Image (spheres, helix red, strand yellow):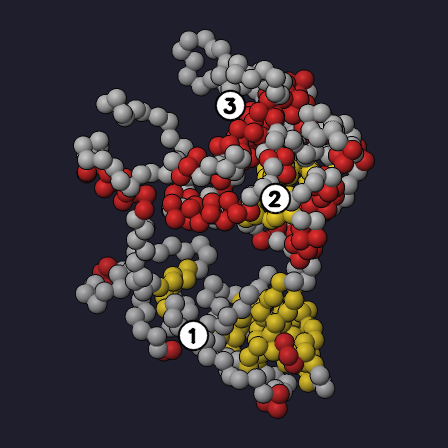
Amino acid sequence: KKDITQRLAANIKRARADVSREILIEYFNNLENTLKNVPACNVYNYDETNLVDDPGRKKLLYRRGVKYPERVCNYTKSATTIMMCGSASGVLLPPYIIYRSEKMWNQWTENGPKSSPCCSERCCASGSRYNRTSHGWMDAETFTDWFKSAFLPHAKRLEGRKVLIGDNLASHFTDEVINLCETNNIGFVCLPKNATHLCQPLDVGFFRPFKMAWRDVLLRWKNAHPSLSSIDKRDFPHLLQSTLVEMDNKKSKENDEQNAITRSLISSFDATGIAPFNRNRVLDKLPRDNVEEGEIQNALVNYLKEKRFTNTPSRRTNKRTRLVVEPGKSVTAKRSSSSSSESDVDGPVTNDNSEEDIDVDDPFFILQENEETEYLEVNKDEIKKGTYVLVKVLGGMRKTVNYRYVAIVQNVLDDELEVVGMKSVDCAKLTFRVEENDEFTVDFEDIIAILPEPTVDTSKDIVQYVFKKVVDVKEI
């Protein structure tokens, strides 16, 4: 019992749990060669994170017996991305801030982190840098800008070889960044996949105290501005500066000479075995395979190994069917086995793929997933007025989405066709009607297929065209 205790467990994904000792050993073997004769002040780790507009939960005083303790505080799900970078010697570069916006305003760049507690050397004298993207996170273009404008000026003043360590996101690999690394004697090191919780210094020891300080600063700001529903971008820079100052002012009983940010960075590189180099700092965190007999019973050991390392069984690949239900109508469970009686179902059921068995007037019918639509090959000579075609049309705000429509050819020109569009009127994509005002031209190369002639249904108020097979359309 003295070797076993109850602890609050954190959830990690199975992909992270599957990181093996062999992968980490190979990583450290390569890292050892890269870090040879490189001082701690030349070893840097970068990582992006986000600061959310939510101060989180906090313990407060309430009257005994209160069942639902609540605190009135506005918050949103919005977040701002920042790129952080620090060295193994405890130097933190000014953060690189990325707003979600199409434009930038000067007020969004005022009173941000500058000088202490970040690097106060001449290379970082301008302080934090600011950028914006439409999605609000870092992409290849913004990463290249961060590398050239924030990290490279700082690295150039350092003597000897430099090492930059980070995750293996595709946006961090550009030809320009790699060429700049080779030109300036910078080793660009990627961490093992799904192992940043073990090997990334900023993840291991820096971001937790940093975000604790952020929540405290944010809560004080919200208490001072109770009417504001979210953080104004004009306030974000000085809130970030206040967060770094508050984090840096935390005292330590063991070491009062160093500021908290310096201590946090040094201990983070130490905990990940990078500086000083010690692979056992990470390998010792992995579950041991050679458990001594009698320490824990074999049944428990086998259970833990099974939960951590056994692959999840794949889902059954039984053939399934897609139910097409008309809006406003309900269905019951369908039994596809031949032994089911007629009393088991409400309404007719289609059990084979023959064209004659499909009745579009039924409340629903079943489409086999492997049923393929038969199209006629595109032959320009066979296209004439009245031909039914499946055409490709670019749509969306940026004209980048490929839509597929059924259309009737109205006129054949030299290099294009004049067509009128059709719109499906049922979920099965079998029945269509003509859109009178939807006339447009398409190139011959945008003709996906020639469709077989449908059956014309004039029994309803609007003339409908019924195809024998499902048409693979993608409509707005």
Look at mark 3 in the image and give the residue it sits on.
57
Determine whether, in the image, residue 374 is placed left or right of residue 300. right
- In the rendered image, which quarter contains the N terminus? top left
Tell which residue pokes out farthest to the front in this image: 37
The answer to whether residue 200 is visible is yes
In depth, the one of 266 and 239 nearer the eye is 266
Q: Is residue 422 above or below residue 310?
A: below
Question: What's the residue at 37%, 38% (across, down)?
Answer: 286
Q: Residues within 10 Å of mark 1 (few under 14, many from 20)?
A: few
Q: Is residue 84 above or below residue 367?
A: above
Tell which residue pokes out farthest to the top in this image: 63
Instruction: Give residue 372's mark.
Output: 1
Residue 138 placed where, x, y %?
Answer: 64, 46
In depth, the one of 47 and 417 nearer the eye is 47
How far apart marks 1 and 2 lie (CA) works out to 55 Å
Element type where label 1 sits in the image: loop
> Which amino acid does the dot numbered 3 rest on?
Arg
In depth, the one of 131 and 364 nearer the eye is 131
Residue 217 placed where, x, y %?
Answer: 63, 21
Residue 255 lies in quadrant: top right
Q: Earlier in the sequence, mark 1 or mark 3?
A: 3
> Which amino acid does the dot numbered 1 rest on?
Glu
Q: Is residue 239 above or below residue 22?
A: above
Element type where label 3 sits in the image: loop
Question: What's the residue at 38%, 70% (across, down)?
Answer: 370
> Which amino acid does the dot numbered 2 rest on?
Val
